[in-house]
Structure formats: C-alpha cells, structure tokens
C-alpha cells in the first residue's frame, strides 16, 4: 500500500492543516472556559499555547527530515551499501562477450598498400593497408580496445572498468614488422594490443642466430616499444614454437608430442620445464608489462581434440589440465572448447582475407557467441 510522504507538497499541506486544526480547537476550548482576571487569562494562554507551539515545531522538523515513502528502501535484511555493491558488480557483467583478434606479421612479402596481402606460402601476414582498414572498421563500429589486464579481470569475474563495446587485440611471435608497421596504425585509432612473445626468437635476435636476427626483435627493442600501446604475454619458450621433431612424422610440435621413447614423467618434465623457464625469462626481460595469466598456444594445439597433431597417450590427458593450473587464460582458435579448462577462443586474421571477409567473420563469430564469457 502506498503512503504519503511529508516531504511531498501534499504531505506538507496535510501537516499545516493538522496544526491549524489543533490551534482552532485550543482556542475554542479556551472560549468555553469561565471568565478570569487578566493575569489568569495570560497564564492560561501560556499553558494552552505552549503545547501547540511544541507540536508545531516537532511537525515542522518531521516534515524536513523524514525520508518518506517516496525514497526507495532496500529489502528487509539488505543494507544500502550491499545493494549498491551488487548493482556495480552487475554493471560490470553486462559485458557478456569480448572479441579477441590476433595478427601475426605486417607487410611481409607484399606491398604495404596492397588491399589483400597474398604473400606466397604465408597467409598470416597482412598489409599495412589491410590492417588500417580492419582497425578502421572496429573504430567505426564502436569497438574500443582493452588491455590484457582488463580482459583478465573481466574473465575472472572481477569488478573492472570496461568500455561499452570492448575488444582485445593481439599480435603473435615478436617479429619486427609486427611492431614497426602496426604501432602507428594502432596509435592513430587509439588502440592498444598485447603481443605474445617467444623467448627463443628474442634470444636468437640478441645472439645473431639465423633466422631470428633481423627478423625478430631483441629484448631491448621490445622494451623500447611504447607502453601506452603494447603489453606482453607468453607464447613459447626456448623450443615451443619451432618444428622440433621432423623425424616424428605423426607429430612434429614440442608441446603436444610425446616421443616414442619418452615416459609420461619425462614428457611432462620436458614440457613443463620449457614453459616455466620461458615465462621466467619473459618476466626478467620485460618486467611488469608482462601479463602472467595468459598463454597463446602455438598452432592452437594443446592436444584438446583428436584432430590435432598429437603423439603418445599422455598429451591428451595431461597437457590441457596442467596448463590450466598455470594460466588463467589459454588462447586457442577452437570455439568448441571456449571456457573449458581456462581455454578462450580467439579469431586469427589472415592476409588472404578481403575486408568483407574480415567483417563477416568477426560479425558471425560474435553472433554465434564464440567469445562469450561462458557458453
């Protein structure tokens, strides 16, 4: 049932009428009393008028400070502070989905002005013109990039400030052209990005080892990248991003391949040791700009499904589970496993795509819920 608040115009009028009614009632009572001398009449006015004055003062104070029924009150047993906290947390999680896009190289074996970069034997590189068109589409459609830290906090269900239409942009491997040609484009649109680093590539660039020198950035060059644009995360250590076992025809990769002569314990020690050392070196070289919660899995292969290259029995039953104890976010291009064992889907952009294909793929992935927090 609704009640009338004394702070509303109707409530104030009601109090005024009540006070005037009391005053007239007192005056009427006084007129019925027998005549008295002047001094007694003065005393009677004081005795009768004082209570009326007190009632009027109290009523006025109540009208000023009483919160009234018009002010929403929390439910029984819920304080106002708790209600506000819940409302803020709900606001954060109105963002159900954050798309993740990944690029690899820019302007390798194609003209920077090429509308489509059809580099022979390398569909991972885009032209500067392609990247500009793709980022322009994102900006025009309201997307704003978030940092690796913001994304990690959102995925963990923490309270974090997010733009209305957030997106995470990523670049893999640490190749020089990924930064020299993309940094000014990112800055032009006000975007930032996280780059997933291979320690072997940076080490090779430092020591002059082929093919890394001149192709990949050194640790010093990575540190010199503008912090307003770039943050870092783990991609692979000293062996995880090259073909290590060409003779092992069923599986040539480092992480998902258990060699024929390897015991389960030996395989686990090899993989866990390489990843642990690679992460340690990454943090030592790049410091606080490294987001330690993330791993972009080379070739999207964490032995999560039978169709991927894998050898031996242990990778399928151990690798993904162990990785989930080390990383809160494991990026793979596999929407089926999105949300399983901390695995998160991301869309890798290819240089063979036209702008229309890029836009269609992103739009379809978003509409299909591939980037949702939980599926």
Image (cartoon, rainbow, N blue to C red):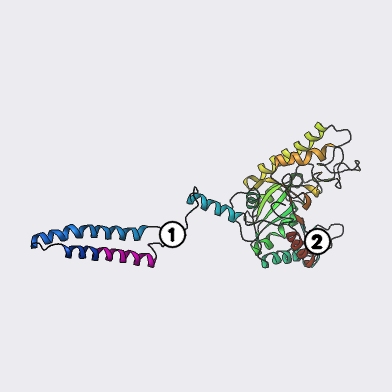
In the rendered view, would you say 317 is above or below 139?
A: above
Per the model, the C-alpha gap separating discs 1 and 2 is 63 Å
Residue 61 image position (x, y, % from top left):
31, 58
SS class, disc 1: loop
Which residue occupies the foreground of this view, 175 or 349? 349
Q: Residue at x 21, y 65 (%)?
A: 28
Q: Is residue 20 magenta?
A: yes
Q: Which residue is mark 2?
A: 351
Q: Is residue 179 magenta?
A: no
Q: Which residue is mark 1?
A: 69
Numbered disc total: 2
Residue 263 image position (x, y, % from top left):
84, 31
Residue 108: quadrant of the picture: bottom right
Which residue occupies the foreground of this view, 12 or 369? 12
* Foreground disc of the pair 1, 2: 1
Q: Earlier in the sequence, mark 1 or mark 2?
A: 1
Residue 333 in view, yes or no: no
Q: Residue at x 69, y 63 (%)?
A: 185
Residue 157 image position (x, y, % from top left):
63, 49
User: Which residues are the magenta region?
Assistant: 1-23
Residue 139: quadrant of the picture: bottom right
Looking at the image, residue 46 sits to the left or right of residue 102; the answer is left
């Amino acid at each position: 049932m609704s009640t009338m608040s004394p702070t509303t115009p109707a409530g104030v009028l009601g109090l005024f009428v009540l006070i005037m009614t009391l005053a007239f009632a007192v005056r009427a009572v006084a007129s019925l009393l027998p005549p008295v001398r002047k001094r007694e009449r003065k005393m009677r006015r004081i005795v009768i008028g004082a209570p009326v004055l007190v009632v009027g003062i109290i009523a006025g104070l109540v009208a000023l400070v009483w919160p009234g029924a018009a002010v929403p009150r929390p439910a029984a047993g819920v304080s106002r502070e708790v209600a506000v906290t819940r409302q803020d947390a709900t606001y954060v999680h109105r963002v159900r989905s954050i798309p993740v896009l990944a690029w690899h190289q820019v302007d390798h074996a194609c003209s920077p002005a090429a509308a489509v970069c059809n580099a022979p034997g390398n569909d991972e590189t885009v032209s500067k013109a392609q990247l500009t068109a793709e980022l322009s589409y994102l900006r025009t459609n309201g997307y704003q990039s978030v940092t690796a830290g913001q994304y990690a906090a959102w995925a963990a269900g923490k309270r974090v400030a997010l733009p209305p239409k957030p997106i995470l942009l990523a670049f893999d491997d640490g190749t020089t052209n990924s930064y020299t040609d993309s940094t000014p484009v990112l800055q032009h649109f006000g975007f930032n990005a996280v780059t997933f680093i291979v320690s072997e590539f940076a080490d090779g660039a430092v020591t002059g080892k082929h093919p890394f020198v001149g192709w990949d950035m050194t640790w010093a060059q990575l540190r010199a990248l503008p912090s307003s644009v770039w943050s870092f995360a783990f991609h692979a250590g000293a062996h995880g991003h090259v073909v290590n076992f060409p003779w092992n025809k069923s599986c040539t990769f480092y992480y998902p391949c258990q060699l024929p002569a390897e015991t389960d314990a030996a395989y686990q020690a090899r993989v866990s040791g390489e990843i642990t050392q690679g992460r340690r070196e990454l943090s030592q070289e790049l410091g606080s700009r490294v987001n330690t919660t993330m791993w972009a899995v080379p070739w999207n292969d964490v032995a999560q499904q039978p169709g991927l290259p894998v050898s031996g029995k242990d990778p399928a039953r151990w690798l993904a589970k162990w990785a989930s104890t080390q990383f809160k976010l494991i990026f793979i291009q596999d929407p089926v496993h999105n949300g399983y064992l901390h695995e998160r889907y991301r869309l890798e952009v290819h240089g063979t795509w036209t702008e229309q294909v890029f836009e269609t793929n992103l739009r379809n992935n978003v509409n299909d819920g591939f980037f949702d927090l939980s599926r």
